[in-house]
Image: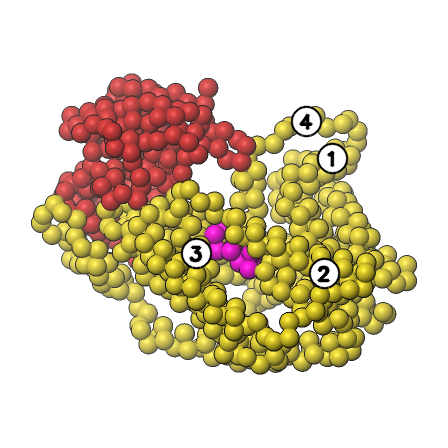
Chain colours: A red, B yellow
Amino acid sequence: MDALTVEGLTRRFGNLVVLDGLSFAVHPGQVGAVLGANGSGKTTLLRCVIGADRPDEGVVRIGAKRIYETDAWARSIMAAALDDIDFFPDLSVYEHLALLAYAHGDGGDPVDEVLGELGLEGACDQLPITLSSGQRRRLALASCLVRPRKVLILDEPEQRLDVAGRAWLTDRLLREKAAGTAVLMASHDAELVDAVADVRIGIGG
Amino acid sequence: MTTTALVPPPGTAPPPSGELKARLRKARRRHRNRSMGDLLTDLYLIAFLIAIYGWAAVDSAGDFLHRQVAAAPADPGARYWIAVGAGLALAGFVWQGLTAVGPLQVGPAVQSWLASTPLSRRALLAPRFTGLALAAAFGAALLGAAGAAIGRSGGYGWAALAGLAWGTTFAAGTVAVQASRVLGRRWPAWSLAGAGGLLVLLVVLAHDLWDWAPAAPGTSLLPAVAVIGVLPAAVLLVLAVRALPLIDRASLSTGARFASAASSAILLLDPSMLAAVVENQRWRAVGRVRSRRFRRGPRWWVLLQADLRRVGRTRAALAWWAVLVLAVYAVAVALPTVGGAVQVIAAYLAADRFAGGLRGISRSAGLRRAIGGSDASLKLVHLVVPALAATLWWLATVPAVGAGPLWLAALLVVGVAATVYRAATRGPMAYGGAVAETPMGAIPVDLIRQVVRGPDLLFVLVAVQLLVR
């Protein structure tokens, strides 16, 4: 697979310029770490890359192909866990993951395996409203693993994870790299970034 | 682990969208107690209430309108063209409203778990689009017929057909532009509102300055309006269906925030939740402002400067203020007997848009603690700007409806400022209080307080205005 490339990305809110002509590339098997202070536009950048927000200028490409969120191919290769994830109140943890795996033609890791890896086996029949914030975060991460992916977009994945969870995250990201996935993630965890990042993308001055 | 209907099948190709949605429906049904019978009962009840109260409202509105027309006959030509202008402007606002909420949108859960998958975007949105188009078409047809009934002009069939055609046009047109990355989404709204406003302004000026108005057409234009609307409705329906696969997640989520706040406001019976989202959207659109030092002085002077700056940053409030001035002049020409009452209500609506500071300071005890001073002094300082807006607005509309006794004008302006104060200083909704049993079901007493606080005083002011003048 070709590299994830961002060219001249600009996003404004009114006359506030959050992202100003940002360009970078993350190749398969690399982790690109988006670094910046609070409010520097890290989440906005990730939202623009996955198409949850429309940039005012600039393009996102995989190789030479421009990415449009409306393109089913783009959605089939790009897995994302951002803070805006929400859940069906009437579906269990297991059903959420099974639904996603089914919708992607079962090309990801097996649901049972992912549940075990993320320590969610005990919560698999729970409805989302009963989950703790940490469990919800783990479910969001799990949603990226039960489906096939060539690009993985994560917004501060270390948030709300305990020490063991952070260790697992580091190991998992290294395995994603080894599998040839291009990972773009925003993070404030210097230890995690040092352990996995190949490309550092500083934004917000 | 619970056995589930969503066990993924072998294979790597994404499944047909219909199969996926069927599995999702099946899984969700297993966790729900609500039967189809319950749903139909609720729908029947809603339709029944709309029919009963809707018919009563149409009948009362018709009676009221014709009483006012008979009491003080106005130039029929001026009235006709003002109604046309108002209709055009209203259509512009409808377009603006539809594009502000999407019009197509999906909830956050669907965005996270379905819209992110390779599921065909057309398959995901087709049922929503069908529902929207049907609701818009038949809702507008009903409104058209109701409008004809209120005007007692006859031609109910043509009015309904016009509503059907133009309701479909608006629903399909806004969906088509939602998908477009090239077309501006709001120019139809500005064009319609601008054309309508200009028409009203010209008619009012011609009437007030030269005592002249263009004649109303001899025959009803409704059949032409209805027939002309069929073509854009058909064309835009086709374009909208073609555009469904191009509607991206960014535009689907824009209106979802608003819809989520609206549903929360309805579920929790707390209208302030919706108002907060609208205000957040407004300030988000502004983005960045130029910060300047405040002129030194006592605390009240600095707070007043901050509130005045807020006014300078809400240009829409200034435009709204001017539109309401024009509305009073138009009503004074078309329905002179209700000009005074409309002046009082519109004065409140104009001044209330300038009460952002008062609302902010009232709803946040933390903000009041941080600024210091007594609650009363803080609220009074933040009442200065809306009171000033009400006074200037009143002076601008005096030529339309007449000055009346000076004491009455002073009383009404002070009353409007007090109404703004009461509305802006509503406390948070309390859910633990008493509940009143009404024909519409059980309603928390505090909700009644929330809704009534402000309009109650306005009602008294309108009554005083009608009795004295």
Q: Residue at x 37, y 41 (%)?
A: A52
Residue highlighted by disc 2? B203
- State which mark lies toward you, 3 or 2: 2
Question: Which SS does the magenta portion mostly show?
Answer: helix
- Chain to which the residue tagged by mark 1 belongs: B
- Chain to which the residue tagged by mark 4 belongs: B
Cα separation, mark 3 vs mark 4, equals: 43 Å
Residue highlighted by disc 3? B173
Label whose residue precedes the other's in the sequence (2 or 1): 2
| Residue B420 visible to the viewer | no
Residue type marked 2: Val
Residue type marked 3: Gly
Residue highlighted by disc 1? B305
Q: Tell if the residue under mark 3 belongs to the same chain as the one under mark 4.
A: yes
Residue B408: x and y, percent?
Answer: 87, 62
Quadrant where the image shows the C terminus of chain B: bottom right
- State which mark lies toward you, 2 or 4: 2
Tell me whether circle 2 and circle 1 mark residues in contact (CB < 8 Å). no
Dot label at residue A63 = none
Q: Which residues fall within the magenta stretch?
A: B90-101
Q: Residue at x 47, y 73 (%)?
A: B161
Rendered position, B66 above or below B123: below
Label whose residue precedes the other's in the sequence (4 or 1): 4
Residue type marked 4: Arg
Rendered position, B200 above or below B42: above
Of the pair B323 and B230, the residue shown nearer to us? B230
Q: How many marks?
A: 4
Answer with left or right where residue B91 lies relative to residue B351.
left
Q: Quadrant of residue B59?
A: bottom right
Cα separation, mark 3 vs mark 1, equals: 44 Å
